């Protein structure tokens, strides 16, 4: 961890219980992905609540076309270097593709991401029976879990691309049931990705744990974006739900601060960042 800057204001550490308190009090949760110590220090100084070491690093750091080639070793490495740049910001790490092959692998991955990597929480995609079992197994060992539903990128081949999920009524109903199931299994946080705005609102009301949206509309309890998308350094096409916060600003610090302010005020996401 970097030493506290002499005149930097101190911030209370963000914790798993404090995220629940934020939902209860209607204070929006600000989350960004992060992959190294220097950017972690930028997130820390901007007062970002949660940093996510996403397996999106396979795309924006490694240059792959999906998140599937990312390994547990890659995730542990990036989690450990991000953790050195953080202080009060809560750190979450993604479980990579196929770390969920069985509960033993999930627990080993959780042990490495939290024990070696320094994450406070791990994120796992989906709500199939073996995922629910894995969530409970982690929570029973005091590893808090962030669930992830909707456009879960590790299912890209099943979806036939990065497609918005939950558009049909039956698919929407299934996602509401999945959200209740991950909460019942013990998840403390829920990322909703690539779903219609109305469904983001419905799920946020159906669960008592905070929801964090990315392409899920403005009614979620918080928002997350891929860091490279909001700084517009992602090569090629960026998802429609992202926004360039560096445009018209003169520093990375100003862009990250503006993102935090716009999420907290409700200015981001705007209707054009959502799906009907
Ligand atoms: N740079 C980056 N940003 C992300 O948000 C992101 C990643 N990488 N990698 C992992 C996943 C993949 N994600 C993506 C990627 C593309 C679309 C996309 O192109 N969506 C279309 C909508 C398609 C539809 O309507 O069904 C879009 O226009 O945004 C969405 C999510 C989100 N995550
Ligand atoms: C987009 C977020 C939610 C993610 O899972 C990632 O960055 O890998
Ligand atoms: Mg991910």
Image: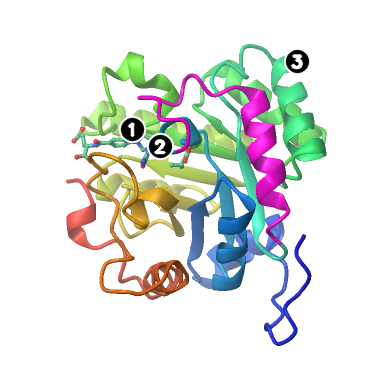
Question: Splitting the image into 4 quarters, where does residue 76 fall?
Answer: top right
Residue at which label 1 appears: 173
The span picked out in magenta is 61-86
Whether ligand 2 has any atom under 8 Å from the Cβ at mark 2 is answered as: no
The x and y percentages for residue 172 are 30, 34
Residue at which label 2 appears: 176
Asked whether residue 268 appears in the rendered view, the answer is: yes
Give how far apart the Cα atoms at labels 3 and 1 are. Answer: 31 Å
Give how far apart the Cα atoms at labels 3 and 2 are. Answer: 28 Å
- Can you say whether 276 is above or below 71 in the image? below
Question: Splitting the image into 4 quarters, where does residue 160 fall?
Answer: top left
Question: Splitting the image into 4 quarters, where does residue 154 fall?
Answer: top left
Q: Secondary structure at mark 1?
A: helix
Give how far apart the Cα atoms at labels 2 and 1 are. Answer: 5 Å
Asked whether residue 186 appears in the rendered view, the answer is: no
Which comes sooner in the sequence, label 3 or label 2?
3
The x and y percentages for residue 128 are 51, 19
Q: Secondary structure at mark 2?
A: helix
Q: Which mark is residue 104?
A: 3
Task: Using a 10 Å C-alpha cutoff, classify the residue at mark 2 as few (fewer than 14 neighbours), some (14 to 19) or many (20 or more).
Answer: many
């Amino acid at each position: 961890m970097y030493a506290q800057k002499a005149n930097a204001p101190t911030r209370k550490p963000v914790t798993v219980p404090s995220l629940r308190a934020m939902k209860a009090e209607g204070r929006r949760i600000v989350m960004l992905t992060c992959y190294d110590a220097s950017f972690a220090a930028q997130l820390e100084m901007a007062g970002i609540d949660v940093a996510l070491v996403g397996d999106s690093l396979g795309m924006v750091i490694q240059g792959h076309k999906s998140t599937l080639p990312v390994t547990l070793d890659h995730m542990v490495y990036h989690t450990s270097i991000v953790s050195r740049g953080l202080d009060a910001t809560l750190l979450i790490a993604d479980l990579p593709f196929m770390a969920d092959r069985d509960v033993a692998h999930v627990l080993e991955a959780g042990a490495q991401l939290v024990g070696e990597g320094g994450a406070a929480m791990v994120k796992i995609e989906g709500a199939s029976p073996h995922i629910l079992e894995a969530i409970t197994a982690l929570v029973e060992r005091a590893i808090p879990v962030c669930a992830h539903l909707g456009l879960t990128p590790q299912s890209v081949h099943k979806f036939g691309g990065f497609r918005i999920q939950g558009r049909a009524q039956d698919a929407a109903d299934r996602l509401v049931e999945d959200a209740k199931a991950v909460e019942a299994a013990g998840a403390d946080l829920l990322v909703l990705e690539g779903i219609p705005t109305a469904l983001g609102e419905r799920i946020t009301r159906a669960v008592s744990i905070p929801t964090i949206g990315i392409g899920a509309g403005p009614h979620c309890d918080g928002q997350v974006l891929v860091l490279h998308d909001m700084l517009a350094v992602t090569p090629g096409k960026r998802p429609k739900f992202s926004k360039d916060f560096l445009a018209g600003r003169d520093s990375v610090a100003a862009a990250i601060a503006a993102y935090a302010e716009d999420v907290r005020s409700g200015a981001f996401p705007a209707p054009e960042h959502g799906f009907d």
